[in-house]
């Protein structure tokens, strides 16, 4: 009986630990002279599904560009994100009509600054659906993002990651 209880306890602990981790995708883009030198992060842990009157249902997912000190300003011109779902379906974000703010597709990030961006995908996508992610610059440079997992340091970090 003790062995069954211990096994059950360990299974629950592993499941809880895996659930409390935050998965994200990232890449570092730099040239040899470091005039281009920034990180791109894509955070499915910060996503929401939106159903509103007058617009087709969509999923928004948070991303960020972190331009490093000493680099040139980073200029985004409608960069894209493509997701391979575990079902085998490939989805690509669409261009919003926003001209400023977190949904604008054209923006500049100065050296040492960051820019938070939300990418919108038609229909419903969940974090569990995502298998692989690519970052597409101006439709001609494609970077596959690496997967990373972090553990929240406390309950407040876990809660803030879902906002």
Image (tube, helix red, strand yellow):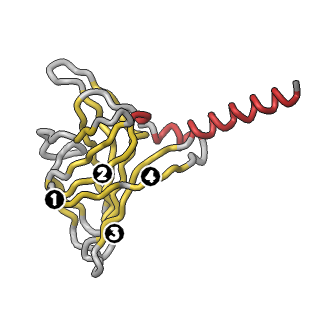
First in sequence: mark 1 or mark 2? Answer: 2
Judging by the rendered image, the residue that carries numbered circle 2 is 134
Q: Position of residue 103 (x, y in %)?
A: 21, 42
> Which label number is shown at residue 140?
1
The quarter of the image holding the C terminus is top left
Local SS, label 1: loop
Image point (22%, 31%), residue name: 122
* Residue 6 sits in quarter: top right
Q: Are marks 2 and 3 in contact (CB under 8 Å)?
A: no
- Nearest the viewer among 84 and 25 is 84
Query: Mark 1 to mark 3: distance in Å?
Result: 23 Å
Q: Residues within 10 Å of mark 2 (few under 14, many from 20)?
A: many
Q: Residues within 10 Å of mark 3 (few under 14, many from 20)?
A: many
Local SS, label 3: loop
How many badges with numbers are in the image?
A: 4
Query: Mark 3 to mark 4: distance in Å?
Result: 21 Å
- Nearest the viewer among 67 and 82 is 82
Query: Mark 1 to mark 2: distance in Å?
Result: 12 Å
Q: Position of residue 21 (x, y in %)?
A: 55, 43
Judging by the rendered image, the residue that carries numbered circle 3 is 68
Q: Residue furthest right?
A: 2
Q: Residue furthest bottom?
A: 33
First in sequence: mark 3 or mark 4? Answer: 3
Q: Are marks 2 and 4 in contact (CB under 8 Å)?
A: no
Image point (14%, 20%), residue name: 54
Query: Mark 2 to mark 3: distance in Å?
Result: 21 Å
Judging by the rendered image, the residue that carries numbered circle 4 is 147
Quick check: 11 left or right of 96?
A: right
Local SS, label 2: strand
First in sequence: mark 2 or mark 4? Answer: 2
Q: Position of residue 148 (x, y in %)?
A: 48, 52
Q: Residues within 10 Å of mark 1 (few under 14, many from 20)?
A: few
């Amino acid at each position: 009986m003790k062995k069954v209880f211990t096994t059950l306890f360990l299974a629950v602990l592993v499941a809880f630990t895996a659930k409390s981790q935050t998965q994200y995708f990232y890449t570092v883009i730099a040239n040899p002279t470091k005039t281009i030198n920034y990180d791109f992060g894509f955070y499915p842990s910060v996503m929401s599904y939106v159903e509103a009157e007058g617009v087709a249902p969509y999923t928004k997912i948070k991303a960020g560009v972190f331009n490093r000190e000493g680099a040139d300003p980073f200029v985004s011109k409608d960069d894209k994100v493509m997701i391979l779902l575990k079902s085998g379906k490939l989805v690509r974000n669409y261009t919003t009509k926003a001209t400023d703010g977190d949904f604008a597709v054209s923006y500049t990030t100065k050296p040492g600054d960051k820019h938070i961006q939300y990418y919108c995908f038609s229909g419903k996508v969940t974090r569990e659906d995502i298998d692989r992610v690519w970052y597409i610059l101006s439709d001609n440079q494609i970077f596959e993002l690496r997967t990373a997992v972090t553990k929240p340091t406390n309950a407040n970090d876990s809660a803030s990651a879902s906002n």
